[in-house]
């Protein structure tokens, strides 16, 4: 069956995009809300920090709970709780800051494992041979959600300060309705090879890949302004960097989806190393845009290869927790990269991503037979 005629996949895709949308809307929505109610944007930043911290801290425990009850049953409940959290936050917008900080914990805790749960359902929605293409197409759609979320908030805010939060709740409800119900029922597998987790060393290269993606991307996405200012360009040139990064990422994912194979992640990690070193070198506009394009083109394929290989290794009864851990590690890399941009010289920050990519590649070279191969979930 072709992916483009796979109705179950597109139902899953619509659900996961709706589930992701509130998280992309949250930074601007929280800021606009607190600015309107308190006159300061700072509380919005605090709310976002608490929200992200709750997501990261609870992603794995909540993912483990999803593994126990089954993602098809657990995801709708989590999405309803997340929607309720946004509604309560909107209704209590005039409450004191400590109350708002406490209330934002609910959508953060409930939403932390949504990505891991949906990714687990994907394994039962498409066949193994379609998996690399399915993940690549999803990466392309994710770029649209990342861009569209803040734009939607800006548009909805014209109708009222609380409207964006209401829309975030509606998106969660839509995602709950779209959670695939016809996939194979979750079963707690106890047999060796399915129920027993592999040694931590087996997962580390793939967690290293996820960390590297977040770490190096943050160097670009958080610092487009200083990157262009280093070349003497005006502030208006900063969006060009993000546009090149997003365009290259979409193109790389499209080519990877067209090819439809897992590929060798060491090739994409090598692209990160070359791109990061070029970015650190400050080699003019050609160096900046070339390095950003190379990193963007390698991002989608590396994410897809990491996801496919993690699925090969994770026991069926621990996939939600495992994928949630992977997403949390990537978010941690993004956070540390953002911090590095704020406190270190600009030329130094890409080198952390280069170092992380080299370490992940080295771990894959050390045990390539156990870590790299064609897709074979059932082997």
Image (tube, helix red, strand yellow):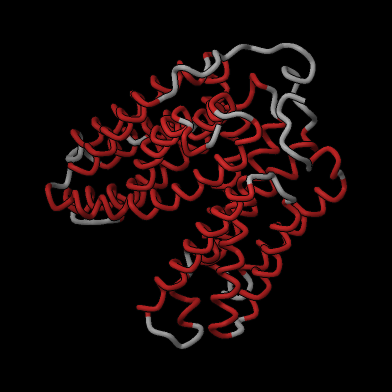
For image coordinates 17% across by 48% down, the residue present is 37
Q: Can you give x and y, in whole percent of width and height, for residue 90 in the image? A: 21, 37
Q: Point out the residue furthest to the bottom here.
A: 232
Q: Is residue 141 above or below residue 296?
A: above
Can residue 214 be seen from the camera position used here? Answer: no
Q: Is residue 38 above or below residue 109?
A: below
Residue 183, image x, y percentages? 51, 19
**Is residue 332 rendered to the left or right of residue 145?**
right
Residue at (62%, 41%) from the top-left corner? Answer: 132
- For the point 55% across and 31% down, the residue is 1
| Picture quadrant of residue 16 | top left
User: Closest to the observer: 129 or 105?
Assistant: 129
Q: Residue furthest left?
A: 159
Along the viewing direction, whichever of 293 and 60 lies nearer the viewer: 293
Residue 130 visible, this orientation: yes
The percent position of residue 166, horizontal first and vertical second, equals 22, 37
């Amino acid at each position: 069956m072709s992916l483009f005629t796979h109705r179950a996949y597109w139902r899953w895709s619509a659900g996961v995009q709706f589930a992701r949308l509130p998280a992309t809307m949250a930074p601007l929505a929280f800021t606009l809300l607190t600015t309107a109610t308190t006159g300061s944007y700072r509380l919005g930043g605090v709310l976002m920090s608490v929200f992200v911290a709750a997501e990261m801290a609870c992603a794995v425990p909540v993912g483990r709970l999803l593994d126990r009850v089954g993602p098809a049953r657990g995801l709708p409940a989590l999405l309803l709780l997340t929607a309720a959290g946004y509604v309560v936050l909107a209704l209590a917008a005039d409450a004191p800051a400590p109350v708002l900080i406490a209330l934002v914990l609910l959508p953060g805790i409930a939403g932390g494992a949504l990505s891991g749960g949906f990714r687990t359902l994907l394994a039962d929605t498409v066949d193994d041979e379609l998996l690399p293409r399915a993940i690549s197409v999803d990466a392309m759609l994710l770029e649209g959600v990342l861009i569209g979320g803040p734009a939607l908030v800006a548009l909805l805010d014209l109708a009222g300060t609380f409207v964006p939060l209401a829309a975030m709740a509606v998106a969660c409800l839509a995602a709950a309705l779209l959670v695939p119900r016809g996939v194979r029922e979750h079963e707690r597998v106890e047999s060796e090879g399915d129920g027993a987790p592999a040694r931590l060393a087996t997962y580390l290269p793939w967690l290293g890949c996820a960390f590297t993606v977040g770490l190096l991307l943050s160097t670009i996405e958080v610092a487009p302004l200083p990157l262009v200012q280093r070349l003497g360009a005006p502030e208006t040139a900063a969006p060009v960097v993000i546009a090149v990064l997003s365009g290259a990422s979409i193109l790389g994912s499209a080519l990877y989806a067209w090819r439809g194979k897992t590929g060798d992640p060491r090739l994409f990690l090598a692209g990160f190393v070359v791109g990061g070193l070029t970015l650190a070198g400050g080699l003019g506009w050609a160096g900046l845009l070339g390095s950003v394009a190379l990193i963007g083109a390698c991002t989608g394929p590396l994410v897809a290869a990491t996801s496919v290989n993690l699925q090969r290794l994770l026991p069926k009864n621990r996939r939600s927790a495992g994928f949630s851990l992977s997403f949390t590690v990537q978010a941690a890399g993004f956070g540390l990269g953002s911090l590095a941009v704020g406190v270190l010289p600009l030329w130094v920050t890409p080198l952390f991503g280069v170092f992380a990519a080299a370490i992940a590649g080295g771990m894959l070279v050390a045990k390539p037979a156990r870590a790299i191969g064609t897709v074979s979930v059932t082997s």
